[in-house]
Image: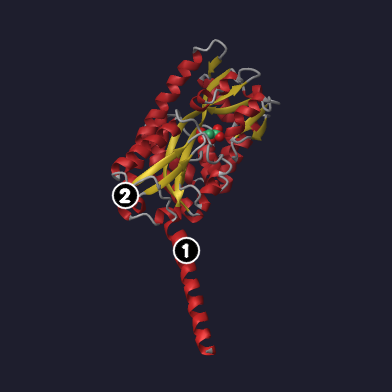
Amino acid sequence: MKKRSVISMMLLFAAFIGVIVLFMQKQGAEHLVYDDEQQGLNKQIVIYFSHVVAENTPKGLAAQKFAELVEEKTNGRVKVEVFPNGSLYSDEQEIDALLRGDVQMIAPSVSKVTQLIPEWQVFDLPFIFETYSDVEKVFTGKTGKQLLSMLDKKGIKGLALWGNGFKQMMSNRRLLVDVRDFAGLKFRVMPSEVIERQFQLLGAKPIVVPFNHVYESLEKHEFDGQENTVSNIYSKGFYQFQPYLTISNHGYLGYVVMVNQTFWNHLPKEIQEKIMEAMQETTTWNLKQSKMQNESELALMKQNDRMHVYVLTEKEREKWKKKFTPLYEQFRREFGDKLLQQIENERKEAE
Ligand code: LMR
């Protein structure tokens, strides 16, 4: 009797362990989100793609295009659900959400990845790119691939680099033309040491504000100026508060498109290939489309009587570049010259 109850206890315990193991396998191995509105439920893979900008922006449109291409190429087996405007996660939260597996895909700006991998700061250096062809060459070439592969050690699979466009300076105080015009002003920045130092060199005070709080901070007059692309300035209506816009093209706003690595590794090989195909097509499209979009939205903003738009001359740009040389010196001290040299060579190939 005693022996029988010991055996049944053991069996019960074994069954309990079995249930736990099954549960953990389901959680760990798949990490896939199933869309229960679909037929063929256990065949469909759903990718939540969260981002913080408006739908009608280079990133918003690229995310949508990517979703369509993936669905088409996998005959509906993979569904990408895009959540724009920070509706799921803010830019402060999205990397952690990706690492936890709460979303499968995000595309934060390069600046927001510098906290994870400091080498990414190279793309935040002012005047690192002069033209859109420079950007395309470097983003899709050796440097882009090298930086993306650095994400592996952080549990992230880097898929591609997308672009938004060149950054411009704006203010509610005055046109920012000379390097001295920045003195004493407060500037909203993204979380990036290089960008913070850039404003400190100009005698300004950088304040980190998440993208989704910028509008609210503008309403409360919490800063005097900011840098961003025409597309972000236009789509979020920032120009209504800061009508002095300097076309400086001093920096570039790029995006690191990434997925949770565990999720990626559990996708069937043929699905990974289809996703990569869709990603390459989208990237080529995005790098062209972003240029056109920034140009056409600048033309629209120029039509607004309240806007003061000034295009920096070459001579004025040279003065800005000179002011920013300490940023390059510091980058070289921290990371050496190799990456900068490589970018320089790729840029030459783009000419
Ligand atoms: C910003 O914070 O200004 C940008 O990174 C937002 C974005 O994703 O374009």
Mark identifier at residue 108 = none
Q: Does the residue tagged 1 have its C-beta within 8 Å of any atom of ligand 1?
A: no
Residue located at (51% from left, 38% from top): 109
Upstream in sequence: badge 1 or badge 2: 1
* Label 2: how many Cα within 10 Å (few below 14, some 14–19, many 20+): some
Q: Which residue is nearer to you in this view: 133 or 254?
A: 254
Q: Position of residue 288 (x, y in %)?
A: 37, 30
On screen, residue 211 versus residue 79, left or right, reads right
Determine whether 215 is above or below 115 in the image: above
Q: Find out whether the residues at labels 1 and 2 contact each other: C-beta distance under 8 Å.
A: no
Q: Position of residue 3 (x, y in %)?
A: 52, 89
In the image, which is nearer the foreground, mark 1 or mark 2?
Answer: 1
Rendering quarter of residue 310 = top right
Q: Amino acid at mark 2?
A: Glu
Mark identifier at residue 273 = 2
Q: Is residue 342 visible?
A: yes
SS for dot 2: helix
Q: Is residue 143 visible?
A: no
On screen, residue 24 versus residue 219, left or right, reads left
Q: Position of residue 86 (x, y in %)?
A: 53, 37
Picture quarter with the C terminus:
top left
On screen, residue 203 versus residue 108, left or right, reads right
Q: Amino acid at mark 1?
A: Phe
Q: Which residue is mark 1?
A: 23
Q: Position of residue 105 (x, y in %)?
A: 45, 45
SS for dot 1: helix
Determine whether 181 is above or below 159 in the image: above
**Colouring:** secondary structure
Determine whether 69 is above or below 226 in the image: below
* Label 1: how many Cα within 10 Å (few below 14, some 14–19, many 20+): few
Q: Which residue is nearer to you in this view: 262 or 198?
A: 262
